[in-house]
Amino acid sequence: MRTPGVAVAVAALLALAACKGDFDQREELSRTINPGGGSTGTVANPNESSFVRGVASIGGVVRNAVVVLRPINLDGSVDWDDNNTLGQGVTFSNGIYQVSVQRSNYRGPILVEVRGQNSIGTVTEGGNPATAVTQKFHVMGPTHVMYSVLPYYEGSSSGDTFVSPFTTFAVTRSLAFDGTIAGVTGGISTGLFGLTCQQTARFFGLAQVRASQPADFAGSGGFGTDQLQSWALAGLAQVARNIGVANVFDFWQGLANDGADDGIANGSIGFVPNTGVAMPDLSQAGLIGDALLNNFMAPGNPDRLVGPDSTTLASGSNLAQLIAALDGARNINNVTVLYDFVFRVPTLVETTRGAVVRTSVLACQQIGGSTSFHPFGDSGGPSFVDFAWSSSSPANVSVQPFGRISVAPTAPNGDYTLTLTVQPKIGQVFVTGATRTYSVLVRVR
């Protein structure tokens, strides 16, 4: 295979103020001052209407799909009971969904489920880059599903929870952990989903997969800007076409099922759903990169609506590096995240008896010479990081999940001390970092 000879160096170099990226948990700061400062905190459960919004895409828009918001329990399990959904809507013709959250007091992670409709007269379709001319839209049936996660919902509207086959794989991988890695069992938590998104991104040669919207390579009415992610999606869609999968959504469902099976895109499920076609091992060399460069980007390919072709590919470009990465053998379990657990916590929280306030505990990821803020939180559920809180007076001041400080209604006025100890979970191999201890003074008046 003729591939560019430039190795991929994927680094999520994120702007400090922007708080973007796969480990950004979309929490809002509660007026936390610089290290050594204080914080007044915020009331944890304000009553206000809000929505979750994003785009469903497979490299082309997914239109007329059912979108369901599902709560995620404190232990990281998903509440699959349709009677307990937080909201439901549909994707529009441009792939956008905007679903109101119906339970005003809900706080925590939200699973965004996108599924094909099963109703007379309505067809759910997705624009497929690999067949954009001969068959622009493929049908998404009721057995086809995609996922993403809003890692922490706090009552405010969120506008960029994008859903794609990549976010779907990150979700199913999160659910697949069986306790063999440091005792971590499957589930969704703020930090764990951030980790699997980062692993998924690097496995497919990308910097991020959750907080960016894929470009519309199918000419299907979308307006995303992440070109590189769509090149990767196009390469995978071309693999599906090459092996004889007629409906690309069967292939995307196979990727999701492969993640749920053992967390690895290795073809362990056997066959692509609804077909007799073997599910390929997507970690093998010479598969995705070859399909992208030599098939999708072949000169004169009538189904490719975007350029360049393989003869005009610029050496050393981001696209050339992506192809080189996808052409090599990869193991998602070898993707590790190196952390210097530097935290920004309020040293002083002033509050009143009976109140519940947020701490906005932030983890800083050191990448090269830059520092990126990532609200890691101390969410319930599975994690590769241990957050341990202790209180000088647990009966009066305690910490609830997601770092909320709870003050008992009968707590005497005075000063209380909370201690936070953070360290990577013993035995796991995905996250490294030093143990750190922090103190927070809670002043009750």
Image (tube, rainbow, N blue to C red):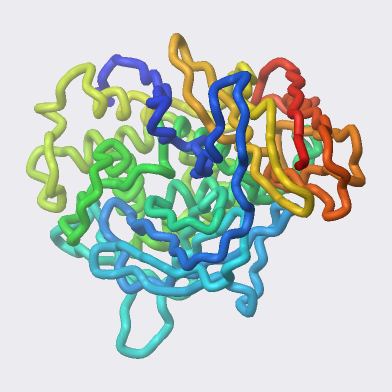
Image point (88%, 44%), residue name: 412
Left or right: 375 as drawn, with respect to 81: left
Residue 83 image point, x, y percent: 63, 79
Residue 69 in view? yes
**Where the C terminus falls, by quadrant?**
top right
**Residue in front for this viewpoint, 397 or 66:** 397
Would you identify the image quadrant in which residue 370 lies? top left
**Where the N terminus falls, by quadrant?**
top left
Image point (42%, 68%), residue name: 99
- Is the residue 392 above or below the residue 239 in the image? above
Residue 115 image point, x, y percent: 45, 69
Image point (68%, 26%), residue name: 347
Would you identify the image quadrant in which residue 425 lies? top right
Residue 374 image point, x, y percent: 53, 31
Left or right: 129 as drawn, with respect to 30: left
Image point (36%, 37%), residue name: 288
Residue 206 in view? no
Residue 221 image point, x, y percent: 18, 61
- Is the residue 421 above or below the residue 78 in the image? above
Q: Residue furthest bottom?
A: 120
- Is the residue 238 above or below the residue 8 in the image? below
